[in-house]
Amino acid sequence: MDKLSGFLESEFERAMATRGEAPADENVVPMDEAVRAQATMRERERRFRELLDALPAAIYTTDTAGRITYYNDAAAELWGQRPPLGSSEWCGSWKLFWPDGTPMRHDESPMAVALKENRAVRGTEVAAERPDGTRVPFLPYPTPLHDEAGRLVGAVNMLVDISERKRAEEQQALLVRELHHRVKNTLATVQAIMGSTARSVDSIEDFKTALIGRIGSLAKTHRLLTDEAGAVSFGNLLHNELDAFDDGSGGRVSLKGPEVALSAQLAVSLGMAVHELTTNAAKYGALSVYGGKVDVTWSLTIEATRRVLTIDWVESGGPPVTPPTRQGFGSRLLDFVLPGQIQAKSSIDWRPEGVRLHCLVPLPAETPPL
């Protein structure tokens, strides 16, 4: 930016120097030389204006009093208006503001400072408010202009729109806050898993095995969230847990349902539930013996203000099922954690021929992008 400002300054000063050129003998001024000098001056000024007009950056010039003498289309677009030449001073924007939102007077703008102190001003961020009320943050590069004798003759200013950069910074700050929130929630989930696992096992070895599996399931769900940019397909959650038991024939695992995108909170909670159901089926249920099968079907109902995900988990062909004599982590997850965290309603039926789960999960009205 400074190189471009310096180039513009040198081009402008060359045009100003041409305006003051005179023959060596001031007593004799050949008419043809005077005409050529004026033509050269006009040509250089024309080329200078064409250069400024062609630049995508907002450019404008002022005289020594700060009155605007020229601006290009990019400057008019940034300001949201076309101020009159010769009377508008310091900057063509309707209003100016400091980065913290405090109003900035035009006579204290970077262009005014550059002219009053006869120096280039750099590193100041300003926001211009257009007549329609929208604000555009920009970086100004005001540079004083001098004639061949070094006298101040005006200034040129380049305004660089940094709206995209500011939006990127805001998005980054939002992502950092979301990361902190997710880390906090994840640590709370890990703490709850450890406590519930410790209460539902009888030995250190069982605790170790169960904890590793549950933390591993949580890690896989978070990996899905990362790979799928913040939203996870419910079908992918099921595949993540059940593909290891699928022999490819469809005889052991059957998954049927539409594409349903889940937010991070929903994905973590449902991922843990699917893991517990899969682990129970592999240890005691349909997936623990050859010939056993797990059928999972799901559907999506769209209502006026929300959507509802309906899930049915059906096991068959496994050992005879008996209701558990104590409440383990999986049961607590279904009975208390899911209703509390994601307002899901579930019921589990310990039928002798196989476990059946019916679950209703409310989803936001808008679908998160996958």
Image (spheres, rainbow, N blue to C red):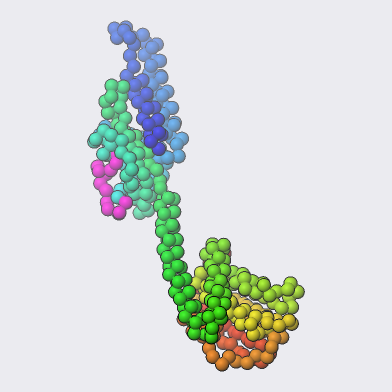
Answer yes or no: is residue 62 visible: no
**330 is higher (above) or lower (below) than 2:** below
- Nearest the camera: 248 or 364? 248
Residue 277 x, y percent position in the rendering: 60, 81
> Is residue 108 rendered magenta in the image?
yes
**302 is higher (above) or lower (below) than 325:** above
Magenta stretch in the rendered image: 99-111
Residue 299 x, y percent position in the rendering: 62, 77
**Residue 353, located in which quarter of the rendered image?**
bottom right
Q: Farthest residue toward the front? A: 204
Answer yes or no: is residue 133 visible: yes
**20 is higher (above) or lower (below) than 9:** above
**Residue 59, located in which quarter of the rendered image?**
top left
- At x 55%, y 74%, the residue is 212
Left-right relation of 129 to 175: left
- At x 33%, y 37%, the residue is 142
Q: Quadrant of the C terminus?
A: bottom right
Task: Count the numbered circles shown.
Answer: 0
- At x 45%, y 36%, the residue is 55
- Nearest the camera: 236 or 68? 236
Q: Quadrant of the N terminus?
A: top left
- At x 71%, y 86%, the residue is 317
